Structure formats: structure tokens, C-alpha cells
Image: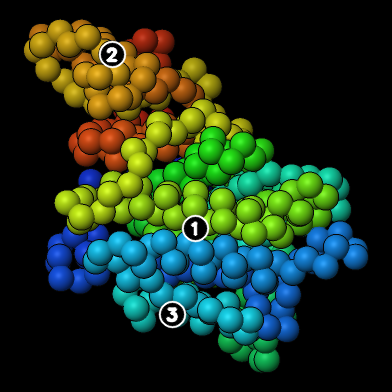
Amino acid sequence: MITKLISSFVLIISFSFSNFTASAAENPIKPFVVVLDAGHGGHDHGNKGKPGSGYKESDISLNIVLKVGSELEKLPNVRVIYTRKTDVFVELRERAAIANRADADLFVSVHCNAHHSNAYGAETFVLGLHKSQANFEVAKKENEVIYLEENYEEKYGGFDPNAPESLIGMVLMQEEYLDQSILLASLVQNNIINNLKRKDRSVKQAGFWVLHNTYMPSVLIETGFLTNKVEGAYLNSAKGQTEMAREIGNAIKSYINSLSISDDKIKHPEVKELEVEKAIETTKEDIHEGITFKVQLAATSKKLNPRPNNFKGLKDVERDKEGGLFKFYYGNTSDYNKIQVMKTFAQQKGFPSAYIVAFKKGKKVNVSEVLKSKAN
């Protein structure tokens, strides 16, 4: 039953990037508010890496967050709020409440991972139902912080970090922000993997309490594993923290730019094309056998060459003639999750009306019908 519910929830999520309007874009007087959340703190040290390493996740996440904030504070019309700036304990629900009270436009939570194996690499999470036991274990570990709070049973309404069914209702709270969350998560992941040469553990969905109560696009970044000897040393170093903060900060700047907020004032590096085939986790729930999803960018009577410089740098654009029009498509996959990321990226690159189409045996079919048939 839970598996069917999870599949249904994931498949019915509807993306509408073009309908999203950032409050800061509507009112140029209001600054774009970014809430930066350093995981753990105070008597909650988070994970400590290998025994004897002396690492503290709470200190490392705070150092990275303060460096990210320092760069973002230099931008005009951007306001940075921290859930903590010192080594203090902040309840999970209060972290989300800080963002909501500030009417924030973005919430970014920074953590470090741990595992009994020698696992390594970076992964970025958006709120969603767990697509694997591994995702569930990561979320459970972060959610178990509530046990350190007084009267947690009353505060969290019976929420049980150890029970997957406790998380099913959480997804709906963030549903309308999911496409923006995926865009930011993909930008973060792309920067860390391409520029810092870290192992790519992909963009994933899982049920983090700290994300589900926020009313804005939100991501949680696991910057790497303190339990890995090499990666732990890197994240504990000033160099590693500075580099990680730089790439997270640049991803946030690129996200802001994608919303056309203060474009005349905010200057930063060009956004690189996402490696979307690697950007987001693939599971059997997302694969539609015999179906090919594509993103339709445009339809015109002109026979344009589908080269990147004619399509704002997008690569592998296909041209197809349908009736009296030439239609141009980006992406080619049977994975609905991946095509959603590609659609969001195409919109971010300058095709706000881009949308997903589906083909079966070369003929166009209704996307909603394809999703319904999979859900059933």
C-alpha cells in the first residue's frame, strides 16, 4: 500500500515554473531573502566522523554557511538570514519558522554525511518521498534530532522519524515549490561536482522535517562524508570549507539570476549546462517503458538549425516537422523525473513556455494519460 501511495504521490506532482512569481520580482523594493541553515549546533554536534578524528559536523556546517552568507551579503537587494551564527542548538521546527517569519524566498540547509562504510561524495536533497532505503536512512538520521528536544512528541504531532508512513503527508506541503527546489539543487550539485571534482551522488528526494515546513523553495546539502578519511579531512579544512561555500554561493546567485531578479545589478559567472542525465536519481517508478519524453522549446515556420547558439546554448536540440511547423525538442528520455529537471533548466535558460511532451512508437501521446496509466 505504501509503495503504491509513494508512486502515486511522486507521479502526480505537477510542475508549473512559468506560473511561479517570486515576491522579490513583483516588488523590487522587497529584498530577495535567503535563509541559510547550518545543521545541528549546541549539544547536538551532528556526526563526528571516524572515531578520534575530532570532527564536528555542527562546526563544519556553520563555517560553510557563514562563508556563503558573507558572499551573498555583498549583493544588492539580497538579504541573508541565518538560523544560527554561533554554536547554539536550534529546534528543527524553529529553523523553518525563522524562514517563514522572514517571508524568505529561499531556504538552504547545509550538513555533512556519515556512513559505516568508506562512502564519499556530495548529494543534494529536495523534499519528497523516499525512493530508496538509503535516502530514508539519511533523512532518518537528520530527523532524529527531534529526540534531543523537550516534549518532542507534543511538538511534532506524533511524527516518527523511523516510520516511512509518517512522511507521506509531508510532500504536499512543498509540492508547489518542488520545481524551483530541484533547479537550485541541480545548480548546487552541478557546481560541486564539476568545479570541485567531488563524487556525484545526485539530486534526491527524501522526507526531511526541516524542509517540509518551509513555504518557499528549499534544499538540504550533504556536502560530503566526514567518515571518509580523505573527504573528512577536506571538509574539515579551511580550503575545503571555502571552496564548498563558493560553489554553493554561486549556485544561489545563478538561481536568483534565473528569476530575473535585479539582473542589472547582480553579476556572476554564466550558468553551465546541467549534466541532467546524472543530476537526479533514477528509480523504476520514474521509468516509462516504451515512452519517450521530450521538452518542446518552440514551434515556428522557420527551419532553424538546432545548433546551441540558436537555442541559448542548449545542446542536442532536435528539429521535427509537424504539419506546417518545425518543432524543436530538448531531451530524450523515458525517465519522467529527468525530463522534469530538463524542462526546468530549459525555462531557466530562457524558454519560459517550454513544456513536456511524450511519444510512443514515434507518435505523440497525452502526457497525463501516460502518467495515469503508470500510477494505476
Q: Where is residue 348? Give x, y as percent.
A: 29, 40
Q: Where is residue 208? Give x, y as percent.
A: 58, 64
Q: Indicate which disc, 3 or 2, sits on the residue closer to the N terminus.
A: 3
Label 2 amino acid? Arg
Closer to the camera in the image, 212 or 96: 96
Rounded to the nearest angstrom, the CA distance separating label 2 from label 1 is 33 Å
Rounded to the nearest angstrom, the CA distance separating label 3 from label 2 is 46 Å
Residue at point 9%, 12% (across, down): 301
Q: Is residue 245 left or right of residue 134?
A: left
Rounded to the nearest angstrom, the CA distance separating label 3 from label 1 is 15 Å
Residue at point 58%, 34% (across, down): 282
Label 1 amino acid? Val
Q: Is residue 209 left or right of residue 149?
A: left
For mark 3, what is the residue? Answer: 98
Residue 62 visible in the snapshot: yes
Image vertical order of residue 24 relative to residue 371, above or below: below
Tell me how many marks there are. Answer: 3
Q: Where is residue 300? Give x, y as percent.
A: 12, 17
Most distant residue in the bottom direction: 151
Helix, strand or loop under label 2: loop
Q: Are marks 3 and 1 in contact (CB under 8 Å)?
A: no
Q: Is residue 5 left or right of residue 214?
A: right
For mark 1, what is the residue? Answer: 219
Q: Which mark is residue 366?
A: none
How packed is label 2: few (under 14 Cα within 10 Å), some, or many (20 or more)? Answer: some
How packed is label 3: few (under 14 Cα within 10 Å), some, or many (20 or more)? Answer: some
For mark 2, what is the residue? Answer: 307
Label 3 amino acid? Ile
